[in-house]
Every structure is written in structure tokens, then in C-alpha cells.
Amino acid sequence: MIDGVRIFEGKKNIDERGYFAELFREDAKEFLGEDRIMQVNLAYSYPGIIRAWHRHNKGQNDYFTCLAGSVKVCAYDDREGSPTKGELDEIVLNGKERLQIARILGKCWHGYKVVSSEPALILYGVSRLYDLKGPDEERREWNDKALVPTSINGKSDDGRVGKSYDWNHPPHK
């Protein structure tokens, strides 16, 4: 994976009432690093919706979890001098099947697409408060032809490598 992108596999404590799970703990340093979750947001998106691309140049990292539906979260590294420059990671989060949190390095371009037939409910934490007067957000179009990965999920032999990234490419196995 791109340096700084991580997955946390949450543990559901299941009993006859349902389940309980801890999503964020301040002492989860192997996952959070030096981050502290400063704000938690909720997004509801309809099937097929793409919310991309953006990045945070002032150091904000994002922590995505899917509570309902499924999303494909992508991170693309174009940072100068990065050992993973040109790489793209695709992470599928499914709210029904697994309790996963994807840590996305904010300095990488990132976004997500709803890949389920039902709407997706995304809970996400951020490591910096949103500043209305000076937002830490740079944007590019979701279908920007200049975003061309040199590898996808660490594979340089993926047929999509060397071409503009296509959010609508059929899911991979």
C-alpha cells in the first residue's frame, strides 16, 4: 500500500442483542500514528455516486468506515520524492460484511465511489478541524485524464496501469 495508507480491522463483540465495536481509540498508535481524530462526519451517497478527487496539503488525514452499502475508496500518490509515487490503492469497504477503517493519507489524492445497489452511509473522522475560512482542500475532476497510475494495489501488470484511472471500470476480484 501507499506509505501512510492503512486498514484497521475492527472487532465486533457479538451477543444476543447485536454487537458493540470500538472504532477509534487514542491508544491505537499502530493505526493512528501521531494523528488525533478532531472531527467526525457522516456522508450519505446514492448508488454510483463518485466523490473524488481531493487532497489535504496541510496534513489532514481521513479515516473512512462504511456503515451501510459498499464503497470503493481510492488513494493516488503523486507526491514528489515519495517511494510510492504514481501508485494507486483501491480499498473496498462493505458495511454489512466487515468492520474496517481505511486510513487515507490526506496529501494523496483520494475519494470514493458507491459500488453497492443501495446507498452508502460513510462515517469518517479527520485529523484536523475543517476551517471554513481557509479549507485544507484541493480538488480535481473525478475523471481527470492526468491521473495515470503506475501500479494499482501494488500490481504493475494490472491492465488499467498506464491509462487514466476509470472509476467505472468493473470491480476487480
Image (cartoon, rainbow, N blue to C red):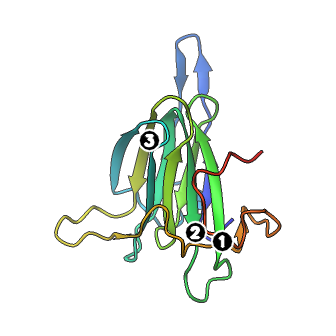
Residue 170 or residue 11, whichever sits in front: 170
Which mark is drawn over residue 122?
A: 3
Residue type at mark 2: give it.
Tyr
Q: Residue furthest left?
A: 133
Residue designated by label 2: 76
Q: Residue furthest right?
A: 157
Q: Are marks 1 and 2 in contact (CB under 8 Å)?
A: yes
Q: Is residue 129 left or right of residue 14?
A: left
Does the image show residue 31? yes
Which circle's residue, 1 or 2, is located before the other in the chain? 2
Residue 144 or residue 56, whichever sits in front: 144
Secondary structure category for the residue under label 2: strand
Classify 71 as above or below 162: above
Residue designated by label 1: 149
Q: Quadrant of residue 61?
A: bottom left
Residue type at mark 3: give it.
Ile
Does the image show residue 9? no
Q: Residue furthest bottom?
A: 81
Residue 48 image position (x, y, % from top left): 49, 41
Q: Nearer the viewer, mark 2 or mark 3?
A: 2
Residue type at mark 1: give it.
Pro
Which circle's residue, 1 or 3, is located before the other in the chain? 3
Query: Which residue is at 49% across, 69% downward?
Result: 144
Query: Which residue is at 64% across, 30% downward?
Result: 97
